Image (cartoon, helix red, strand yellow):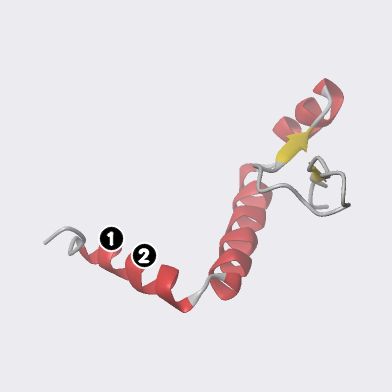
Amino acid sequence: MRPMLFISRKLCENGRMKNSPLIYYRTKEEIAAYRKKPVKLKMQWLEAQMEFFYKAMPQKAKKIREKIEKGLLGK
């Protein structure tokens, strides 16, 4: 089973989200339970997350990422 992430952002007075970083909350028990999971399961979860983030990534960010992977950024 994949671990849940709790995301919290403070709201401005008008109810809109602030442009602040996301905060992930985990209890010590949740962390301990996750550490007991098999490495293969944790790697599968990580791979699924990376796939999701790549699909959600703007095209400009994908081009920058590809340049970094090829060692072409800054050249």
* Of residues 21 and 67, the one drawn nearer to the viewer in this rendering: 21
In the orientation shown, which residue stands out farthest toward the left? 75
Reading the image, the residue beneath label 2 is 65
* Of residues 71 and 16, the one drawn nearer to the viewer in this rendering: 16
Residue 39 in the figure: left or right of residue 72: right
Kind of residue sitting beneath label 2: Arg
Q: Residue at x 81, y 40 (%)?
A: 10
- Contact flag, marks 2 and 1 (Cβ < 8 Å): yes
Residue 5 in the figure: left or right of residue 67: right
| Residue 1 visible within the image | yes
Q: Residues within 10 Å of mark 1 (few under 14, many from 20)?
A: few
Task: Pick the quarter of the image with the C terminus.
Answer: bottom left
Residue 72 in the figure: left or right of residue 10: left
- The x and y percentages for residue 39 are 62, 43
Reading the image, the residue beneath label 1 is 68
Disc 2 from disc 1: Cα separation: 5 Å
